Image (cartoon, helix red, strand yellow):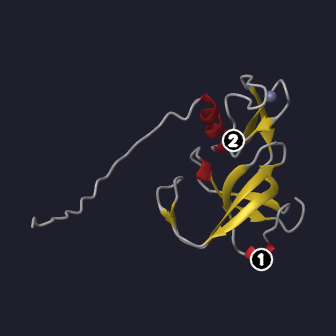
Amino acid sequence: MKERISVAIEMAQSWGYASGAAMERFSAGLRERRIEALRCSGCGRRYLPPRPFCGNCHLILEDWVAVADAGSLEAWTVLNLPMLDGRTGKVREAPYGMGLIRLDGADTTLNHYLDLADPERLAIGLRVQAVWREELRGAMDDILHFQVLTEEP
Ligand SMILES: [Zn+2]
C-alpha cells in the first residue's frame, strides 16, 4: 500500500480586471458621492449599475443621469453564515443583510448590504438610504450599507 501524503499549500494571488468604460465613470462618480445610471435613448430605462447596452433595445447606452442615494427595498434577506466579501476581500461576519435596492431615479436594482440594526423592520417597499464611507475611493464599498429611513428625507 502506498502512503498518501497531504501537503497544505497556501498561495497568495492578486488579480485585476478591466471594469469597462461604464463602470469606470460610475466608480469615479462614487468618489464624489455621486451615483449615475445610464439611460436608454430607446425605451428610457435607467440602468443601475450602469451597463453598456440596453437589455430591451440592444442600443448602446451613453446618456448619464444622476440618481438619488436613497430608494426602496425591493427584496432582502438575512444571511447567517460568514462569507468572503468580494468587494473587500475580507470575511463578512454573520448575520448580515443583503437587499435589492431601487434608488430613486433608477429602473433597475442595486445589490448591497443592509444595516441590521433592526432586522424585524425589513420589508419590501421600505425606504432606505446609503451610508457612505468617510474617505471615498471610487469603489462600490464607498457605500458601506443602506440603512432604513424612519422618515422621508
Ligand atoms: Zn432600451
Question: Does label 2 or label 1 sit earlier along the sequence?
Answer: 2
Q: Is 109 left, or right, of 90 in this rendering?
A: right
Residue 11, horizontal then vertical, whole percent: 29, 54
Q: Which residue of the protein is positioned furthest toward the right in this rendering?
A: 152
Question: Mark 2 highlights which residue?
Answer: 49
Residue 136, horizontal then vertical, whole percent: 60, 49
Q: Is 91 rendered above or below residue 11?
A: below
Q: Residues within 10 Å of mark 2 (few under 14, many from 20)?
A: some
Q: Amino acid at mark 2?
A: Pro
Q: Nearer the viewer, residue 36 or 75?
A: 75
Q: Is 117 rendered above or below residue 83?
A: below
Q: Is residue 129 visible?
A: yes
Q: Nearer the viewer, residue 6 or 139?
A: 6
Q: Amino acid at mark 1?
A: Glu
Task: Point out the quarter of the image occupied by ligand 1.
Answer: top right
Q: Is 116 left, or right, of 95 in this rendering?
A: right
Separation of residues labelled 2 and 1 (CA atoms): 28 Å
Q: State which quarter of the image contains the C terminus.
A: bottom right
Question: Mark 1 highlights which residue?
Answer: 120
Image point 73% across, 74% down: which residue? 119
Q: Nearer the viewer, residue 88 or 109?
A: 109
Q: To which quarter of the image does residue 116 belong?
A: bottom right
Q: To which quarter of the image does residue 51 belong?
A: top right
Q: Residues within 10 Å of mark 1 (few under 14, many from 20)?
A: few
Q: To which quarter of the image does residue 134 belong?
A: bottom right
